[in-house]
């Protein structure tokens, strides 16, 4: 290898190293900003309304703060998957994210590479010296910012040398074809999953002195807007139908933006000349085009959000809806692991769903018992399999979520839900027992006396009412209704005692079938235990300390009664 070839190879590695530093700096800056403001930004996004202008504004603001349209879009896909945001709301936020991401290009277009070492020094000192999380994250952001510009400075000299090479010039000539430039921008962005990185590299080439044709640069940038959709598509793969629609909306919006601007450029070629005449610095020209392109696309398409969502709904029509009691999770999936701030809420929604399924199963089991309906009892047994599945899945997710970085309140909620899921599952077991009693009555022709059935009916209604009340309190965190719980539990306990006493008397009077009597006492025990579990569910909202105090108090009372 001669000296010239060796120098060329070294120059390639210098460019690749500078590019790596640039991408690393951008990633560090984005991650640091998201850590610093991510949870607050998610809260802001979560509260967005159906007002398209507010959604666009929020999307732009959040993306400008966290410096990543991909991160914003992934958050939106997660919110849509969780049922916390509609497709119309998501569309507005996605449009706004395209505007917010242009801030990155504007920052990079400033020639700050000379100051990169001092910026890196300040960021490193802040990140290592400060103990407060906020200051450490701020230092991390500054460090990333400095590394980004240092990467630009590293690439500068070899890129300028490459620009004189015939092969490099031939490649640039090939990219003068707008379609090839679009495809190149889309492909590179799909690989690095950041349109800001693609735009930044184009600007870095200008800052390094590469004579890249302006028309080629703008079509690469337009293509990058399509390539960045890959992140949202990946995030939606394991999500529900509505999330896939949100990702498809992102794709269609960006493709339409490229088509619209391609037509505008063809119709008004003086527009590009105007940008070049207005802004003398090539790097600034690219940054301004990026901003104008995204803002103009949003201004044009925001009036067609209803039509856009309607098109997406037709392209991805609703599949036949799954039964509400099928073995699947609705609100817990891998996407929430990226959003700890909403993880506890989603787990709560999933547990509430399980609780409602269990309540329905208890109600059906009690109805089946009094109607002696074997078919309905069989459906109860089938649904119990779903309840068991949900119990195992939710418990596993709650354990996983406890490993995330959650605040104290969310950790307390997870602990409360771990206790509650057990109580809900036990109510499901008692409903299963009651359904099996129906089968026993059918198979053995077991008779239960009319007085006994009347007592069981009254107790069954009270038990179902107690479970329904507990689920309402748990679901809505309604402490005001806790006063209704104890009287209802005492009534169930009194009914249970009266049932047992009356049953003993009926046995003495020989007006009760012995086998029917065994079934009767088992039924009383199941209904009484349902009342106990319902009370646990209701009082779980008070937190672990108060829940334990109440449980110890009840155990002490029980010991005294014994």
Image (cartoon, helix red, strand yellow):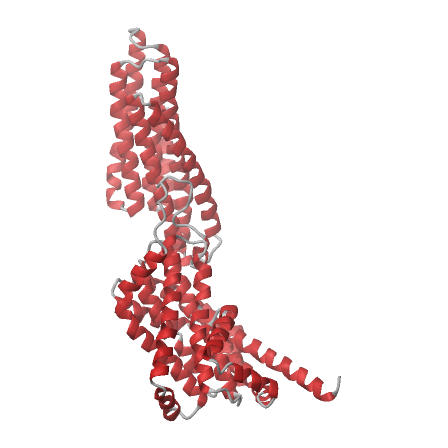
Q: Residue at x 60, y 78 (%)?
A: 16
Q: Residue at x 36, y 34 (%)?
A: 533
Question: Which percent across, then down, holds residue 281?
Answer: 43, 91
How many labels were placed on the picture?
Answer: 0
Relative to residue 186, is residue 519 depicted above or below? Answer: above
Q: Nearer the viewer, residue 426 or 62?
A: 62
Quadrant that contains the N terminus: bottom right
Q: Residue at x 55, y 81 (%)?
A: 151
Q: Residue at x 35, y 89 (%)?
A: 270
Q: Quadrant of residue 306?
A: bottom left
Tell me if residue 195 can be seen.
Answer: yes
Q: Nearer the viewer, residue 425 or 183?
A: 183
The residue sitting at the right extreme is 1
In the figure, is residue 263 to the left or right of 212?
left
Question: Which percent across, then down, holds residue 328?
Answer: 42, 44
Q: Nearer the viewer, residue 109 or 119?
A: 109
Quadrant that contains the C terminus: top left
Tell me if residue 561 can be seen.
Answer: no
Question: Which percent across, then down, holds residue 382?
Answer: 40, 32
In the figure, is residue 3 to the left or right of 38?
right
Question: Which percent across, then down, holds residue 463?
Answer: 29, 30
Q: Nearer the viewer, residue 231 or 255?
A: 255
């Amino acid at each position: 290898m001669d000296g010239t070839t060796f120098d060329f190879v070294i120059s390639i590695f210098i460019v690749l190293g500078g590019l790596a530093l640039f991408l690393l700096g951008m990633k560090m800056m984005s991650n640091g900003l998201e850590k610093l403001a991510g949870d607050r930004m998610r809260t802001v996004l979560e509260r967005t309304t159906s007002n398209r202008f507010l959604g666009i504004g929020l999307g732009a603001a959040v993306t400008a703060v966290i410096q990543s349209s991909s991160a914003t879009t992934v958050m939106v896909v997660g919110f849509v998957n969780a049922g916390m945001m509609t497709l119309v709301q998501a569309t507005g936020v996605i449009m706004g994210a395209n505007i917010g991401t242009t801030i990155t290009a504007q920052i990079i277009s400033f020639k700050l590479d000379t100051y990169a070492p001092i910026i890196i020094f300040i960021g490193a000192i802040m990140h290592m010296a400060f103990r407060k999380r906020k200051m450490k994250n701020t230092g991390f952001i500054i460090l990333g910012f400095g590394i980004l510009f240092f990467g630009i400075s590293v690439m500068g000299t070899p890129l300028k040398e490459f620009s004189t090479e015939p092969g490099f010039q031939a490649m640039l000539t090939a990219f003068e074809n707008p379609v090839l430039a679009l495809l190149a921008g889309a492909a590179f962005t799909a690989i690095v999953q950041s349109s800001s990185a693609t735009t930044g590299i184009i600007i870095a080439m200008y800052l390094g002195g590469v004579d890249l044709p302006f028309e080629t640069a703008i079509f690469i940038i337009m293509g990058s807007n399509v390539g960045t959709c890959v992140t949202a598509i990946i995030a939606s793969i394991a999500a529900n139908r509505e999330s896939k629609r949100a990702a498809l909306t992102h794709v269609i919006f960006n493709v339409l933006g490229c088509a619209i601007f391609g037509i505008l450029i063809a119709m008004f070629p003086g527009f590009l000349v105007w940008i070049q005449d207005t802004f003398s610095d090539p790097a600034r020209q690219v940054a301004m085009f990026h901003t104008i392109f995204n803002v103009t696309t949003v201004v044009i398409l925001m009036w067609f959000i209803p039509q856009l969502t309607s098109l997406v709904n037709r392209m991805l029509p609703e599949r036949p809806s799954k039964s509400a009691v099928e073995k699947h999770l609705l609100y817990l999936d891998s996407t929430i692991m990226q959003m700890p701030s909403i993880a506890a809420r989603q787990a709560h929604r999933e547990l509430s769903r399980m609780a409602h399924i269990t309540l329905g199963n208890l109600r059906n089991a009690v109805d089946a018992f009094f109607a002696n309906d074997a078919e309905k009892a069989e459906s109860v047994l089938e649904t119990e399999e779903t309840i068991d599945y949900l119990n195992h899945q939710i418990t596993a997710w709650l354990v996983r979520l406890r490993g995330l970085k959650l605040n104290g309140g969310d950790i307390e909620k997870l602990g409360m839900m771990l206790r509650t899921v057990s109580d809900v599952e036990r109510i499901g077991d008692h409903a299963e027992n009651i359904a099996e009693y129906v089968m026993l009555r059918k198979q053995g022709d077991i008779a239960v006396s009319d007085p006994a059935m009347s007592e069981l009916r009254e107790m069954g209604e009270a038990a179902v009412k107690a479970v329904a009340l507990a689920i309402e309190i748990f679901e809505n965190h309604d402490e005001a209704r806790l006063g209704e719980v104890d009287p209802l539990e005492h009534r169930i306990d009194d009914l249970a005692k009266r049932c047992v006493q009356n049953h003993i008397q009926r046995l003495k009077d020989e007006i009760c079938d012995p086998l029917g009597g065994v079934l009767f006492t088992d039924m009383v025990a199941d209904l009484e235990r349902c009342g106990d579990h319902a009370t646990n569910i209701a009082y779980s909202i008070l937190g672990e300390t108060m829940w334990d105090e109440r449980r110890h108090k009840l155990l002490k009372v029980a010991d005294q009664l014994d």
